[in-house]
Image (tube, rainbow, N blue to C red):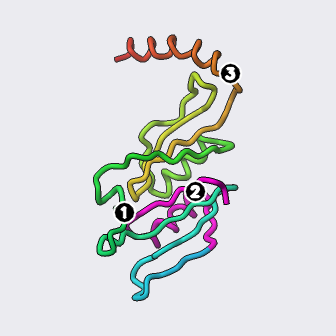
Amino acid sequence: MATLTPYLTVRDATAAIEFYRRAFGAVELMRMPSLDGQKVMHAHLKIGDSDLMLADEFPEMGGTRAPTTLGATSVTIHMSSPNVDQTMATAAAAGAKVLMPPADMFWGDRFGILRDPFGHEWSIATTIRKMTPDQMRAAMPAVMSQQQQQQ
């Protein structure tokens, strides 16, 4: 596994696993049900070359809460994709809500944001041109000025 691996808490991990399979092509590597079989205590998925772990909420055990329980999330999961438009369309067809449609960004990516049905936000990007930090800094003011004028 990589040094960092996202571990998501969701309501209805079984449905989440199916959503990630349909939306992002996730492959389920392992699932451990609770003793009563009603919840998923731990699941390990693979999306592309990355690991993703998840579990149902277990508030009775002091576990973390799902974004749908909290009404917000403080983390965005970033995904690199060979085709951001196709990835976002597939995720939307599987039930994700597009928060920001894909658009070309000043830092060299085609980039969009969605929220999955379990409250987790995903930024998805395809690099369309390699840019240095200096090139990004130089491109940013024009874009920010244009956005301010549109508001």
- Going from N to C along the chain, the mark reached first, 1 or 3, is 1
Tell which tag, 1 or 3, sits nearer the viewer: 1
Residue with the mark numbered 3: 132
Q: In the rendered structure, which segment of residues is drawn in magenta? A: 1-29
Specify few, some or many for label 3: CA neighbours under 10 Å numbering under 14, 14-19, or 20 or more: few
Could you tell whether 91 is left or right of 9 in the image? right
Which residue occupies the extreme bottom position in the image? 36
User: Which residue was labeled with disc 2?
Assistant: 5
Q: Is residue 151 above or below residue 14?
A: above
Q: State the quadrant of the N terminus.
A: bottom right
Amino acid, disc 3: Thr
Task: Give the class, few, some or many, for how many residues have Cα within 10 Å of label 1's Cα (few <14, many ≥20).
Answer: some
Badge 2: few (under 14), some or many (20 or more) residues near its Cα, within 10 Å?
few
Q: Earlier in the sequence, mark 2 or mark 3?
A: 2
Query: Secondary structure under badge 3?
Result: loop
Give the x, y percent position of residue 87.
59, 48
x and y, in percent, of residue 131 in the image: 68, 23
Q: Which residue is under mark 1? A: 64
Residue 119 falls inside the magenta stretch? no
Say above or below: 149 vs 109.
above
